[in-house]
Amino acid sequence: MAKIVESLKRLSVEHGTRKYNDNRILKRKSELISSIEEAVSLDHNYILAICGTQSDPEFRIGTALSDRTCVIYSVGESLSRTITLTHNQAPIVGITFSPTSRNILYTATSKGLITACDLRAKGKVIAEFKDCSEDGKMKPLCSFDVSYDERLIAGGTEHIGGDAFILFWDIRNTNSKLYNKNNLLGGYWESHMEDVTCLAFHSNKQDVLASGSTDGLINVFDLTQPSEDSALTYSLNTESSVDRIGWLNDDNLWCTTHTHSLQLWNCDGATPYTKFERSNLAISQTDDPDNCYIVRFHASNTLEQAFLVAGFSSVKGENLRCLNIVNDHLEVHNNMIGNKQVVRDSWLHKKSGSLITVGEGGLINIWKQAETTPTQQNSSHKLVAKIGTGKGRDRQHRSKPY
């Protein structure tokens, strides 16, 4: 593992305006076709986020809409709407299925409430998790995550009263039953100075949590430690405003920022070992960097290697593509034919290779491989592909001028 990391650190990443020959791009890229398209809402509601279950052959996806509802679908050979949840009383800041059950869905709202709903009981709320401070005011949330063993929930708050909090609840605790007011375990409030925009529990280590913030920091905590100071294991400065983070493997993280840059980090690193700015998303000479944006990085090798979903607007409409890291630049691996909207989030079903996107047009698109074009992989291409497998954005966070 150490040799792989050191090799990646030595990769030369260029951040200039260098353009690559379009013929070279065409040799490498193939197409993903939208096999299914579904309009979730006809009322001009955005779909802000998507999550899913890795069950097979039929799996479920959950969508969070700007009207505060969640629409759940069953996906097999077709897409079937199963239930619409209407219990949320504030904008949704996160949505995820239980890591252990395809029937339990967690949602978090900006007012500070996290709920667990049982889809077998018509979406009944079976548990609530909230901050019950002495003053009775719940802290507004920006993000949340559930540990892979479904033992802990972590919630990241806005910057309030001079502090930004990471709050913790024990899901197994009998005190976390519905309407009980004493279910908060505790929290951290000294490690971030601005909104905690994203949280990511480690996919293999149940007591390791990474957090990202508009203050530019990615912090990694060991939750077994007795205090916040001793729990803070690593603090990485992105010099930007962190939008999303996820784990690549035991010691590596990916990060996307509100300025549409991608960074890959080793926890021990003082700087990212790979970094691409928004200008690097402009693959073709006709692309305008100001019209390019990042959707999400996927650390899975399902589509041959880890990839970045990115979009760009043009006179021909809203375009979407999957980008791979090859040596010191990004290359198109899959063009996504038939996209009709600005995409806000994406999710990957690993077994079937289905990539699902949602966005501002209120549409769900399920993308599948159309035709694979043989590609010549070099050593660095293979190294990036070995970076293992990892783990919404419903409000505008203020950006910091770095």
Image: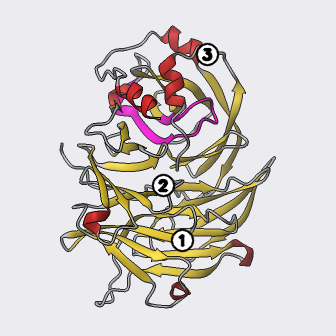
Q: Residue at x 53, y 42 (%)?
A: 341
Residue at 22% over, 70% down? 163
Q: Label 3: which residue?
A: 375
- 262 in relation to 156, above or below: above
Quadrant of the rendered image containing residue 13: top left
> Disc 2 to disc 3, how far (Cα)?
32 Å
Mark 3 vs mark 1: which is more N-terminal? 1
Res 162 → quadrant: bottom left
Q: Position of residue 148 (x, y in %)?
A: 56, 61
Mark 1 neighbour class, 10 Å CA radius: few under 14, some 14 to 19, many 20 or more: some
Determine which residue is flagged by label 2: 202
Per the model, the C-alpha gap separating discs 1 and 2 is: 13 Å
Q: Nearer the viewer, residue 30 or 203?
A: 203
Residue type at tag 1: Arg
**Residue at 29% of width from left, 71% of height from top?**
227
Q: Which residues are magenta?
A: 287-310
Q: Residues within 10 Å of mark 2 (few under 14, many from 20)?
A: many
